[in-house]
Amino acid sequence: MEAQRGLGWTLLQILRNLFTNPRSLQAGVIIFSGLILVDFLFRSLFPNFSTFLEEQGTEILWSEMDVGFAPILWLVFITLILGSLTIVISFAAEKVPKLIDLYMDHWPSLFFVWLTTALYIHALTIKLMAEMQMDVRSSLILNYNIFLPIFMIIGFPFILSILYSTKTGKVIDNLLESIHAIYLKLASIGPSEELNPKKRLKWQIHLFETTNQLIDLLVYVPYKEPKAQIIEGLGDQLIEYLKYKKDFPNSFFEVIDEIREDVSFKTLKSQFQDIENDRVFYELKNFRVIGNAYISFIEAGEFDLSTLCVEQVKRIGVKAVELKQEKMMDLVLIHLNTHLRFALKHGRLNNEPRNLYNLIFHYGKFVQSLIEQRDLPRVKTSYGHYLFYGQAIFEALLDAPALAFILDTLATEMQKGLIKMYHLHWDRDHYFDQLKQFLLLDNLQNIDRGFAFNFFRKNHGIRLLHIGMALFFLEHDEEEWARMIAKDTMQDYDLLGKDIFQKTMNIIYARLKFSGPTFWEDTDRGNINIYYTPYQKQIDAFRNIQNEYISMQPKPAKVI
């Protein structure tokens, strides 16, 4: 009974939309007008056609032609088409309710349904006119001998095309295309023009409902490919949104009441004035649904999909930097930090570094785009975030020792940023500030000395990257900064003692000297060796500088 009610409800929805949807009515008017014109045109040409047949020696008895069977065939066609649409859309709409609306805005489907209906009415009219002894020969030939065979050939391919269009991938494409169509309509109006309130209501609701249904598909669809298609599609569409946004009418950013009640904004009602002023309500919606998907994926252990979520936020952020959209840059930073917090919590509970590793990589890519634009305030803020999360990871190591590698990942991204700043000739004072942040990464706050001793005795990654940075400085004749790093290593000398310090440094120098640019194992980021430096020839110069500082050190205290 539920299935029957579902089919009946879908049929009623299809019929209601056919007779009330403006686009459907336009299609109906076009089809009926076109059919009338074609009928009149064929009627004017029919005498020539009839004469041609007679000249071929063909004897045609027009009065004996049966006109009773065609309406039944057209009725069968209508039943097949509407029935197929009803069944296919009914089952597909269980997962994507928006599908009915999509089909009711789909020109090919509307034209086909209305053309079948028009030809059925045309056949009925011919039958009635024939019974009234009217001359219907031309219309008879047109309907029965031309249109009917054509429809017998293309009817089933059309039904198969409807079946094909309900594949998950096609449904996702249709939903994404419907979002993009709204962008184009908004951009065509222009920022100075007033947006009709009814259109604003319709388009805002369409954007939010479609986004919600795409996210719902993530729950229903068991396969990774369509999930990835949705995530990448949301990222692509939001990037397009940012590109077109400047051309949208200003009134579009006035949020309607229905949007304020959206599930994503239930906890943000007090902030709506700021959201409207910043014009980020749609971006915030997308970030929230991507964030929810990210949490679901990390909890399900789907590392590739969780990484894809973060990658979209990074891509959107890079585009915002390129377009110089200040509010969006701040929003991206906030949500990258939010994802990092969730990934850290998950990593600590499960002793799993993979999500953090992938996330920090994309975080670093966004920061590098800020560096390229010389956005000092946000770069400075980001380096402060690196330190904050580094401290949080240190505190989590007792519960999740596997997170130790994430400290190296943070150091790697800070090092990449410093190298990019140097090549872009940043102001030296500003550069020096970020370099100090880099060296503070292993300066632990409120960490037990015994724990620090055991950790740094076994984990050399941060110091490897520090010294790799020093070798870069020596290669570029920046001995002052290389000396600063050498002096910073004396903290290790004080912590570890002379013998263990020397042993640790020998290991570090050996790794820097003999390690290549690639690693012998594969990771989510390929097999790049994050500790590699191409400046091995500067190792001896750095060791000499370091030895100078060692010679200045008092005898280290014994470690208990």
Image (cartoon, rainbow, N blue to C red):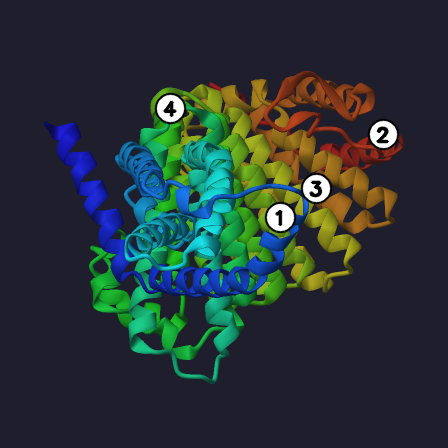
**Of labels 1 and 2, the one closer to you:** 1
Asked if the residue under mark 3 is in contact with the one under mark 2, i.e. CB atoms within 8 Å, the reply is no
* Residue that appears at 35% across and 36% down: 217
Residue 230 seen anywhere in this rendered image of the structure: no
Kind of residue at badge 1: Glu
Kind of residue at badge 3: Ile
Asked if the residue under mark 4 is in contact with the one under mark 2, i.e. CB atoms within 8 Å, the reply is no
Lower sequence index among marks 1 and 2: 1
Q: Nearer the viewer, residue 219 or 147?
A: 147
Label 4: which secondary element: loop
Label 2: which secondary element: helix
**Mark number, residue 54:** 1
**Mark number, residue 536:** 2
* Residue that appears at 35% across and 46% down: 289
Q: Position of residue 285 (x, y in %)?
A: 35, 54
Q: Position of residue 195 (x, y in %)?
A: 38, 78
Kind of residue at badge 2: Gln
**Of labels 2 and 4, the one closer to you:** 4
Lower sequence index among marks 1 and 4: 1
* Residue that appears at 59% across and 44% down: 364
Residue assigned mark 3? 485
Q: Nearer the viewer, residue 102 or 393?
A: 102
Residue assigned mark 4? 222
Q: CA distance from mark 1 to mark 2?
A: 97 Å
Q: Is 240 located above or below residue 102 in the figure?
A: below
Kind of residue at badge 4: Pro
Q: CA distance from mark 2 to mark 3?
A: 16 Å
Asked if the residue under mark 4 is in contact with the one under mark 1, i.e. CB atoms within 8 Å, the reply is no
**Of labels 3 and 1, the one closer to you:** 1
Pointer 2 local density, CA inside 10 Å: few below 14, some 14–19, many at least 20: many
Asked if the residue under mark 2 is in contact with the one under mark 1, i.e. CB atoms within 8 Å, the reply is no
